[in-house]
Image (cartoon, helix red, strand yellow):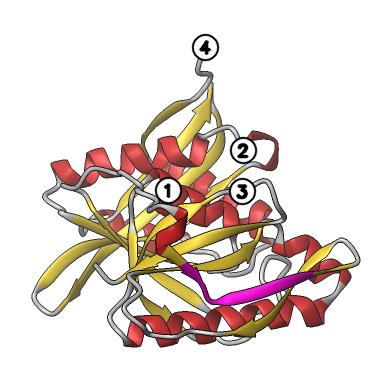
């Protein structure tokens, strides 16, 4: 039985709960304040809450965006209580966000996420069907909070077409060329060299650690290598017109992004 009630949040007392929830999750850093949430919700913003009875255990928030004559929802924040993670709650909140966004007339939702966060990549690309064509190096500057750990804050810009089915198609292995080699250092994956030969190959795969946080705790230099190798790979590929549209999980300590020219 699903214990969660997932619904839109508009009541002022519940909006205050979201602000308090942010303070707990992010230690009062990088939070969206109450007045901004109120103003946003009165002007096209959407706030989703996940509840167990009256307790808030997760939220998802987005505000309206506009660029080049296109209106879309910017999904700015999502968080889940630690004990409720890995149970599909993030996916359920995104589905509810999509449902409400469509009712409000949105056709696309966009948001940024860290390319090194394998768990987020699986949700955003493999499960929801978003695509990535844009890479922002050090998007927010150096963020010395617990989550970012002092690494440059590189971000993907994910685009989620709400009218498109979320089918994540992985091409046959013989069609994909690897462009970053890696090795084991102690029991951690560490990137080696970047090699991209643009020779009529339609698909490339790029490894990403399954748990970058453990690597940051144990060897910051290796974590930093992953940051810069992925940055170089994606900037080269996106500049050539490739786009990221699939994510492959494995039994190793890395998963793979799959980029396509078609």
Q: Which residues are magenta?
A: 177-183
Q: Is residue 128 left or right of residue 183?
A: left
Query: In the image, is residue 223 above or below residue 212?
Result: below
Badge 2 marks a residue whose secondary structure is loop
Q: Position of residue 118 (x, y in %)?
A: 58, 57
Q: Which residue is mark 3?
A: 250
Decide: few, some or many residues near mark 1? Use Cα within 10 Å; few <14, some 14-19, many ≥20: many
Tell which tag, 1 or 3, sits nearer the viewer. 3
Q: Position of residue 237 (x, y in %)?
A: 39, 81
Distance between the Cα atoms at labels 2 and 4?
A: 16 Å
Quarter occupied by residue 216? bottom right
Mark 4 and mark 3 in contact? Answer it, CB < 8 Å: no
Q: Which residue is mark 1?
A: 126
Q: Residue at x 21, y 49 (%)?
A: 162
Badge 4 marks a residue whose secondary structure is loop
Query: In the image, is residue 249 above or below residue 144?
Result: above
Q: Which residue is mark 2?
A: 86
Is residue 180 a member of the stretch shown in magenta? yes
Q: Earlier in the sequence, mark 2 or mark 3?
A: 2
Distance between the Cα atoms at labels 1 and 3?
A: 13 Å
Prevailing SS of the magenta stretch: strand
Q: Residue at x 40, y 61 (%)?
A: 175
Q: Earlier in the sequence, mark 2 or mark 1?
A: 2
Mark 2 and mark 3 in contact? Answer it, CB < 8 Å: no
């Amino acid at each position: 039985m699903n214990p969660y009630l997932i619904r839109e949040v508009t009541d002022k007392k519940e909006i205050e709960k979201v602000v308090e929830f942010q303070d707990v999750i992010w230690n009062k850093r990088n939070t969206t304040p109450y007045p901004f949430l109120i103003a946003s919700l009165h002007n096209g913003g959407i706030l989703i809450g996940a509840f167990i009875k009256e307790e808030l255990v997760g939220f998802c928030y987005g505000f309206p965006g506009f660029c080049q004559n296109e209106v879309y929802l910017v999904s700015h924040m999502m968080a889940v209580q630690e004990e409720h993670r890995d149970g599909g709650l993030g996916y359920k909140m995104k589905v509810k966000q999509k449902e409400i966004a469509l009712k409000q007339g949105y056709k696309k939702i966009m948001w940024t996420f860290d390319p090194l966060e394998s768990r987020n990549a699986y949700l955003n690309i493999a499960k929801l069907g978003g695509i990535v064509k844009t890479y922002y190096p050090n998007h927010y500057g150096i963020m010395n909070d617990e989550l970012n750990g002092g690494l440059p804050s590189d971000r993907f810009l994910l685009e989620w077409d709400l009218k498109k089915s979320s089918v994540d198609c992985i091409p046959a292995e013989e069609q994909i060329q690897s462009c970053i080699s890696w090795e084991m250092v102690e029991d951690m994956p560490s990137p080696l060299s970047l090699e991209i030969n643009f020779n009529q190959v339609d698909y490339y795969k790029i490894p990403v650690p399954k748990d970058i946080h453990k690597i940051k705790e144990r060897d910051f230099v290796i974590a930093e290598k992953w940051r810069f190798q992925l940055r170089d790979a994606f900037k080269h590929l996106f500049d050539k017109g490739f786009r990221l549209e699939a994510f492959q999980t494995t039994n190793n300590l890395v998963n793979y992004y799959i980029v396509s020219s078609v």
